[in-house]
Amino acid sequence: MIERRRRRRLHIITHVVVALGLLLVAAAGRFAYRSSAAARIPVVIGVLLLATSHILMTRELYRLENMERELHDANRELESFSYSVSHDLRAPLRSIDGFSQALIEDAGLTLVPEARSHLDRIRAATQRMGRLIDDLIGLSRVTRSGMTFERIDVTDLVEQIVAELRRQTPDRVIDVLIRPGMTATGDPHLVRLAFQNLIENAWKFTSRRPHATIDVGESRDKDGVPAFYVGDNGAGFDPEYADKLFGAFQRLHTSAEFPGTGIGLATVQRIVHRHGGHLWAEGETNQGACFYFTLE
């Protein structure tokens, strides 16, 4: 959707530039024709320079459009390849996990503790790989799926996500502050997925806080564009590595500290970029984190 809009804008700009250039060249040529012989030479030279610069600018616009199209096509091919590979890996992983489970059930009592430990590790590794593949497929779908723009009740959406997390973890006591009256325009499914990933991250990284708090509200970026934020008082991160947060598989905490595959924030970034917005984060180690994003 965003790529089509950009291409359409580029076509409009190109046609406007062509029309203005032709008008300027025609006006300058008419002026040169009516001028005296002494004034005609510099005017003609100016017309030629104007026409040349106009041609070069138009060619550059089309070159940029072709580069964008080629990059877009290459990205789509890469995403399709990643989706196919990830999908095809599921079957052998299920076999490894299934046969390992069958071996434990059939021969578990006769296995020495070390052998049983090896099988448990095999199952744990295959299950983790399965979750990683599921997340990769989900990331690919975010980029490949179509988009429909609607008016969204963000406050209600966030309340639904928090209510579901409370049902899943009834033992957690978390103070969640949700600003009332928040709305946005975007794809309902993708916007929900973005908030879900950010709130689940905040839920996870506050798990070691005796008094955990999460804050979801509205703000503005440095240019005054409306933005949403999800903040928490959890583990935080070293601000020196803030730029690495949004890459796939980038983790600033070990899986032993906090489980996960490192795909969530990469998914949020793709969703935000598809809406034409941007995503950034602020935080300090052990002082919590806050993630901001715009949708335009």
Image: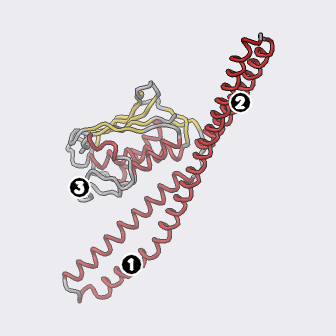
Query: Of the residues tagged 2 and 3, which is closer to the observer?
Result: 2
Q: Residue 96, labelled with which disc? A: 1
Q: Which residue is mark 3?
A: 257
| Residue 70 percent location from the top left of the image | 59, 51
Q: Left or right: where does residue 15 sit relative to residue 207? A: right
Instruction: Look at the numbered disc 2 and give the secondary structure of its residue.
Output: helix
Residue 109 in the image: above or below residue 56: below
User: For this rendering, which residue is in front, 286 or 153?
Assistant: 286
Q: Earlier in the sequence, mark 2 or mark 3?
A: 2
Determine which quarter of the picture holds residue 269: top left
Query: Of the residues tagged 2 and 1, which is closer to the observer?
Result: 2
Q: Left or right: where does residue 92 sit relative to residue 168? A: right
Q: Residue 34, labelled with which disc? A: none
| Residue 38 percent location from the top left of the image | 73, 11
Q: What separation in Å lies between label 3 and label 1 (alpha carbons)? A: 27 Å
Instruction: Look at the numbered disc 3 and give the secondary structure of its residue.
Output: loop
Q: What separation in Å lies between label 2 and label 1 (alpha carbons)? A: 62 Å
Disc 2 residue type (three-letter): Val
Q: Residue at x 42, y 27 (%)?
A: 220
Determine which quarter of the picture holds residue 130: bottom left
User: Dot 2 surroundings within 10 Å: few (below 14), some, or many (20 or more)?
Assistant: some
Instruction: Look at the numbered disc 1 and give the secondary structure of its residue.
Output: helix
Residue 48 in the image: above or below residue 120: above
The image shows a total of numbered marks equal to 3
Q: Earlier in the sequence, mark 2 or mark 1?
A: 2
User: For this rendering, which residue is in front, 158 or 85?
Assistant: 85
Q: Residue at x 42, y 39 (%)?
A: 279
User: Dot 3 surroundings within 10 Å: few (below 14), some, or many (20 or more)?
Assistant: few
- The colour style of the image is secondary structure
Q: Which residue is mark 2?
A: 18
In which quadrant will I find the N terminus? Answer: top right
